[in-house]
């Protein structure tokens, strides 16, 4: 089994065996250079210039998921197109050298402009402006034969079906080779929400939409009804519901669970869904009970939203250990904090093996430092 640089704690250590795939997670998508401006009181009016208190820069888009998974200890590989410009240099070097994401299925393209997103964080919300061009190669051409991996992440989309007509897609090939296929779905700006998009779940093992997406695609009026509709289509159905928490059904284990969100001051939700998904994959591959998987994912996303900026905010095991230690020694003894200590008691066995001083969330940024630091431990 190969050694991954920077991996001081392995959450899958107990389930690894000789002959297992070297990779835990393989993902494909678009990498953006994210530039995050923070501390804005308002967006500028026409012709105005306003100054931001802070700035961070990091790989974004699908890199949010890859970084989140890697920081949680998954051996992660990413297939994406990268430009040969300075933006592409930065994103490639950050992912490969700082975050230790495998890029052997990614490619650099001469003269192709790297996609860029500028995110403006204003009053706990954000606005984004993006620029980019289609990838020179589609997923099938870029990936070829997918690598052996415990799991792959895919997106349901009407224009990029996961089920091939003339030949198997890379997702079908990966599943046939034994990979768990975990899917999410993007926002439909047309408002059509075509129901037949869900037909692609026939080649998926798990589906992780948010409540709005789940209700729209299933034509239901509540997150719970949407969950039950999805549970008829895919073995593991998970619906995230923002400040209301998350709910899930796992037909493979016969479990059903609902967890509340943690009480935190949310500064920037960018990438929180990717962090949640990465945490669900960790717990599923490790074989944790469903309630623990949902609770862990809720915690990881809660830690992420307390910081500004996509992959910059993705927590590592050091952050998780710090949070749990704070909860254990806290003197607050109201019903909420007693519930926290009960629900997350399973972390005792996990963080006990986390080395002291283990790396935490990002230092990789063009500016070298993130200008907004610290988090509310809840």
Image (cartoon, rainbow, N blue to C red):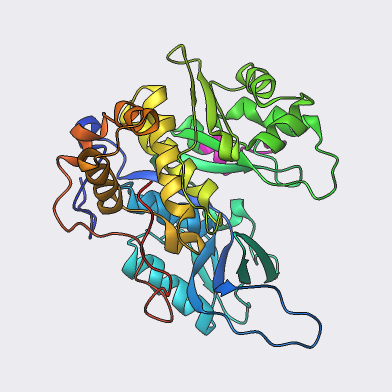
Magenta span has 318?
Answer: no
Q: In which quarter of the image is residue 18?
A: top left
**Residue 100 visible in the displayed image:** yes
Magenta span has 171?
Answer: yes
Residue 4 versus residue 146 in the image, above or below: below
Q: In which quarter of the image is residue 352?
A: top left
Answer left or right for 316 relative to 7.
right
| Quadrant in which the N terminus appears | top left
Give residue 338's position: percent from left, percent from top.
Answer: 32, 29
Give residue 272's position: percent from left, percent from top.
Answer: 51, 50
Residue 304 versus residue 247 in the image, above or below: below
Q: Please give the name of the residue rendered at 63% of the width and 28% of the height, measured from the top-left corner.
A: 201
Viewer-closest of 250 and 363 = 363
Q: Please give the name of the residue rendered at 24% of the width and 55% of the height, measured from the top-left corner.
A: 4
Viewer-closest of 83 and 331 = 331
Q: Quadrant of residue 340?
A: top left
Residue 13 versus residue 373 in the image, above or below: above
Answer left or right for 214 relative to 336.
right
Viewer-closest of 243 and 61 = 243
Give residue 315's position: percent from left, percent from top.
Answer: 37, 53
Q: Please give the name of the residue rendered at 29% of the width and 38% of the height, measured from the top-left corner.
A: 332
Answer left or right for 353 relative to 361.
left
Give residue 53's position: percent from left, percent from top.
Answer: 52, 79
Q: How many labels does the image show?
A: 0
**Residue 178 visible in the displayed image:** no
Magenta region, mostly helix, strand or loop? loop
Residue 240 versus residue 120 in the image, above or below: above
Q: What span is colored magenta in the figure?
A: 164-173
Answer left or right for 273 relative to 42.
left
């Amino acid at each position: 089994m190969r050694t991954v640089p920077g991996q001081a704690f392995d959450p899958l250590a107990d389930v690894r065996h000789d002959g297992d795939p070297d990779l835990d997670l393989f993902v494909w998508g678009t990498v953006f250079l994210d530039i995050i401006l923070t501390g804005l009181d308002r967006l500028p009016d026409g012709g105005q210039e306003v100054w931001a208190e802070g700035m961070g820069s990091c790989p974004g888009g699908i890199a949010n998921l890859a970084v989140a998974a890697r920081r949680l200890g998954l051996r992660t590989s990413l297939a994406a197109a990268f430009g040969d410009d300075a933006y592409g240099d930065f994103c490639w070097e950050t992912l490969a050298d700082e975050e230790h994401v495998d890029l052997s299925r990614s490619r650099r393209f001469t003269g192709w402009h790297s996609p860029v997103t500028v995110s403006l964080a204003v009053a706990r919300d954000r606005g984004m402006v993006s620029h980019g061009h289609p990838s020179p190669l589609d997923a099938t051409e870029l990936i070829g034969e997918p690598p052996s991996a415990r799991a792959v992440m895919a997106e349901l989309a009407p224009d990029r079906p996961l089920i091939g007509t003339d030949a198997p897609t890379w997702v079908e090939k990966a599943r046939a080779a034994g990979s768990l296929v975990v899917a999410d779905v993007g926002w439909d700006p047309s408002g059509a929400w075509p129901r037949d998009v869900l037909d692609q779940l026939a080649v998926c093992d798990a589906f992780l939409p948010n409540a709005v997406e789940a209700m729209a695609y299933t034509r239901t009026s509540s997150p719970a009804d949407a969950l039950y509709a999805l549970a008829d289509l895919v073995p593991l159905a998970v619906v995230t519901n923002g400040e209301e928490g998350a709910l899930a059904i796992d037909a493979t284990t016969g479990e059903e669970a609902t967890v509340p969100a943690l009480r935190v001051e949310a500064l920037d939700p960018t990438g929180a869904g990717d962090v949640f998904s990465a945490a669900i994959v960790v717990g599923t591959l490790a074989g944790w009970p469903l309630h623990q998987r949902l609770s862990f994912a809720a915690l990881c996303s809660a830690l992420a939203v307390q910081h500004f900026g996509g992959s910059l905010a993705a927590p590592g095991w050091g952050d998780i250990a710090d949070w749990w230690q704070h909860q254990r020694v806290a003197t607050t003894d109201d019903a909420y904090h007693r519930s926290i200590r009960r629900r997350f008691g399973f972390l005792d066995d996990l963080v006990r093996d986390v080395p002291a001083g283990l790396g935490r969330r990002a230092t990789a940024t063009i500016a070298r430092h993130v200008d907004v630091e610290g988090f509310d431990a809840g």
